[in-house]
Amino acid sequence: MTQQNQKTSQTQEGIRQLSISRGRMLNLDRILVPLNGYRRSEQILPYASMLADWFNGEITLFHSLPNTHPARGARPGQVQYPDAPHDRGTSLATAYLEEVVSRLGPHGIKSRWGIATGDAAQMITSRSSTSAFGLIATAITVRSRTHRFFSHGLLENLWRKTSAPLLIVNPNNTIPNNEPPNAPKSIIVPWRKDSGDFAMPIAIALAGASRSNIKIVIRKSTPPEQVKAKFVDAVVSDQMDIEIIEPEKNFTKSIASLQNSDPGAWIVTRSRMRSGIGRSVFGSMADTLAREASGPIVVIPDPDVINKRKRQIRTTMRDIATSR
């Protein structure tokens, strides 16, 4: 009996190490967490900490300071030094981020912090690209389509610019009373055409590291055997349970309902990351899930979108460097 338990333990540890290696190949051990100083934004920290724990990774806390006009805040007859507001902002942001780091340390979570000055979405996406972060993790409320017509929030701007996957948690749906969230027992993967193929590596890495099963949600027109064949290697090497679910009702709403009935479950989906009028008018499955999901959702940009946005980020960074 002891030998059998020892063998099982060694097998489980080997599976975990394989999952960690897969996650590191996808940079899932490097998590960028934008914080704005409000408690709501900090509600992403338990989920980012889960990732860091699963993949023996590190969290980078990030704060973006707005550009400040040299004359802002100056009184009549008062000399206002251009760098003074920025220096004060930097000091406050530094103290805040160091305090958050000190809270994470006792839980065994490795973390560091960074500060930049400029448009928040641009600074976040630039940092994620140049420093090869695997995920941008944020707790933020997704605005309605009507609201987005008149005002873009941080998430809308990240949606338009990011080349890195987004881990989104709606602060309105997180567990109250500061209780830690449930660890996932399931990773839910919507399967549409080739969307599941691209979401599969991250879904397998997350499921393996968290020891969760994978629930693949398919449309009626999709042969279950064809989908399951895509996961055969994970089933064998990671001893992973795969469940194929064919909903009877609305595809997108069924995914949200499935997560709602499985506390702690994560959704992993790819997206063409529509923005502007196209996203406001037509929406998308990922957009709907980001608004309605009761738990974490990982949104992965399409490969073509990633390549295009990486080029845009390089151009933007080059323009910023030459303008100084």
Image: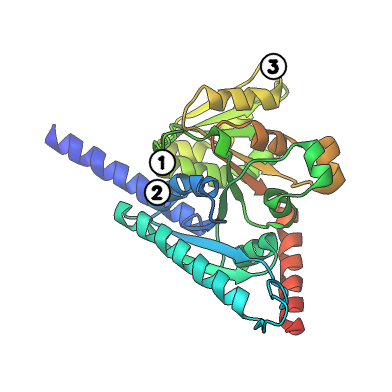
Question: How is the model colour-coded?
Answer: rainbow
Q: Amino acid at mark 2?
A: Trp
Q: Residues within 10 Å of mark 2 (few under 14, many from 20)?
A: many
Where residue 147 sits, quadrant-wise, is top right
- Determine which residue is flagged by label 1: 210
Q: Decide which of 205, 29 is in the foreground and name it.
A: 29
- Determine which residue is flagged by label 2: 54
Question: Which numbered disc flags the more N-terminal residue, 2 or 1?
Answer: 2
Q: Amino acid at mark 3?
A: Lys
Q: Decide which of 113, 298 is in the foreground and name it.
A: 113
Q: Decide which of 165, 123 is in the foreground and name it.
A: 123
Q: Residues within 10 Å of mark 1 (few under 14, many from 20)?
A: many
Residue 65 point in image, percent of width and height? 62, 67
Residue at 29% across, 42% down: 11
Q: Amino acid at mark 1?
A: Ser
Residue 288 point in image, percent of width and height? 71, 33
- Determine which residue is flagged by label 3: 249
Residue at 15% across, 38% down: 3
CA distance for labels 2 and 1? 6 Å
Quadrant location of the N terminus?
top left
